[in-house]
Amino acid sequence: MSRRIHIYDCTLRDGQQMQGVDWSVADKQAIARALDAFGVDTIEGGWPGANPTDDAFFASPPPLKRARLAAFGMTRRAGRSAANDPGLAALFGAKTPIITLVGKTWDYHAEVALGVSLEENLAMIADSVAEAVRRAETVMFDAEHFFDGFKRNRDYALKAIMAAHASGARWIVLCDTNGGTLPDEVEAIVAEVTRHIPGDQLGFHGHNDTENGVANTLAAVRAGVRQVQGTINGIGERCGNANLISIIPTLMLKMGYETGVTEEGLRGLTRLSRLLDERLNRAPARGAAYVGESAFAHKGGLHVSAVERDPATYEHVAPERVGNRRHIVVSDQAGRSNILARLRDVGIDIDPEDRRVRRILDEVKAREFQGYAYDGAEASFELLARRMLGTVPEYFHLESFRTLVERRGEGEEALSEATLKIVVRGERVLTVAEGNGPVNALDAALRKALLPHYPEVERLKLVDYKVRILAPDRATAAVTRVMIESEDAAGNRWSTVGVSGNVIEASFGALADAVTYFLMREGATAG
């Protein structure tokens, strides 16, 4: 069997079935270009005739250098010829080099969902594939509900895919449409199918309803399929599709298969994953395999000490191979190795025997006992360490702040106002600002005070704000932790933390760290 696995991406069509996903034409074009640059073999662009966005995309597809574009559609309707079917006409009109047709292979679905006889369903598959073969370079047949159909009526499911194969389909894709099949079942059923159709003409399309989308895909490959389908980050209907971001590096780095993605291209895996999250305006999953922020994070002091000697002690692959990075976390579980590694990461060169290393470690542990969390707030840790080393400029000094929330009448929105007194470059500044909530008002007041002295603050954005109650048994008197995530104009992000019995004071602590860290990164000078 060939060691080459073809990668078929469904993000632009199947991925859009996920709740909250609604691609624009520009989104689809940008994602297609990124997939092409990454090295996938086939990009499923959408379903011509299904909606205006897909029609506009196929009318103006992006130029692709490596990948080929596929249009998706279904077999002809009952009682129509394939040459005179409106759905197929729209599909053929897209003029893509690849056509992917979906058809029923579960007898239950043919009779109940389509309401046709089993023989008519076979004819619909054969006629549609034959017509598509006349219209496109390559035809693929998606055998919908194949595994459920095989388990209920093995002979009919095989007849359905054999009808497509005999009519000229290049690939027969076995679909676990409901996502309920388990890896051992997939492997056994695919092995049976390879006795009828060669593995290098078989594909697998899995869903993740039992959290087995990736495992089922790998099982199908072991059993002989040579095309795998999925989406970036596993987005898709219900629980999602099989996740190509996990599948591709596992095939290449763990199982020794070749794909259209090169070793160099694989270094763009993390970037591709995060590009999709940016398009969806959502935070990347920290715990995502290979590409998550925590995928190569080390927190325990014992682990970090070992990783310092040899990363392979606690890493299954080198993070650089998938475009990620090693992340040494600082927390109350940290040892000297954690502190030294983090200081090196941020460019602080210090003698390991310097007494200040122990003081920084002790301070981290004391603060985490109070409620701080530096494993998720790297910027605040760096500021803490630099302050203890005396290397953080004082860009501003807080004298006082006050916030006011006023509701003026029934049905009226509450008004938030902040008054801030700070010293900036020797000048005492008093500002007042309104905002959508007291924290937003404080942010506006601080920017208003700083902008005349530090105009670069205009480029700072606050992108996320989280509050956690640390002692719920104390109810309204509980200690509060606030985490703020910020972003600069280049898209770099960092997190800061504040802790207090008062949520506004905790918020200002995190906000002040965010601004200070930004100014320090920008190379601003304090007066």
Image (spheres, grey):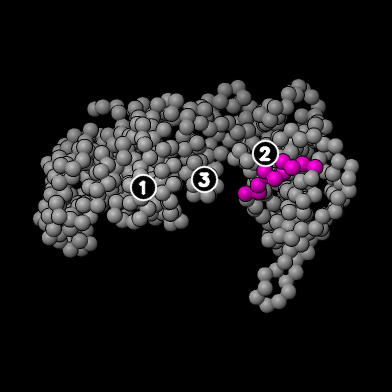
Q: Are marks 2 and 3 in contact (CB under 8 Å)?
A: no
Circle 1 residues within 10 Å: few <14, some 14–19, many ≥20? many
Figure quadrant of residue 169: top left
Left or right of 320 on screen, residue 126 = left
Q: Which amino acid does label 3 sit on?
A: Glu
Q: Foreground mark, 2 or 1?
A: 1
Q: Which mark lies nearer to you, 2 or 3?
A: 3
Q: Position of residue 320 (x, y in %)?
A: 52, 28
Q: In which quarter of the image is residue 527?
A: top right
Residue name at image x 84 percent, y 44 percent: 424
Residue topped by disc 3: 278
Farthest residue toward the front? 60
Q: Few, some or many C-alpha atoms within 10 Å of disc 2 (few <14, some 14-19, many ≥20)?
A: many
Task: Give the magenta part as a residue range.
Answer: 453-463
Identified at 89% across, 42% down, the residue is 426
Q: How far apart are marks 1 and 3 (CA)?
A: 20 Å
Q: Which amino acid does label 2 sit on?
A: Glu
Q: Residue at x 76, y 58 (%)?
A: 433
Residue matched to label 2: 378
Residue 392 makes an appearance in the image: yes
In the rendered structure, which amino acid carries the disc numbered 1? Phe
**Mark 1 vs 3, N-terminal side:** 1
- Disc 1 marks which residue? 57
Q: Which of marks 2 and 3 is nearer the N terminus?
A: 3
Camera-near label (1 vs 3) is 1
Examine the rendered structure and indicate whether residue 502 appears above or below residue 337: below
In whole angstroms, how far apart are the C-alphas of marks 2 and 3? 21 Å
Indicate which disc, 2 or 1, sits on the residue closer to the N terminus.
Answer: 1
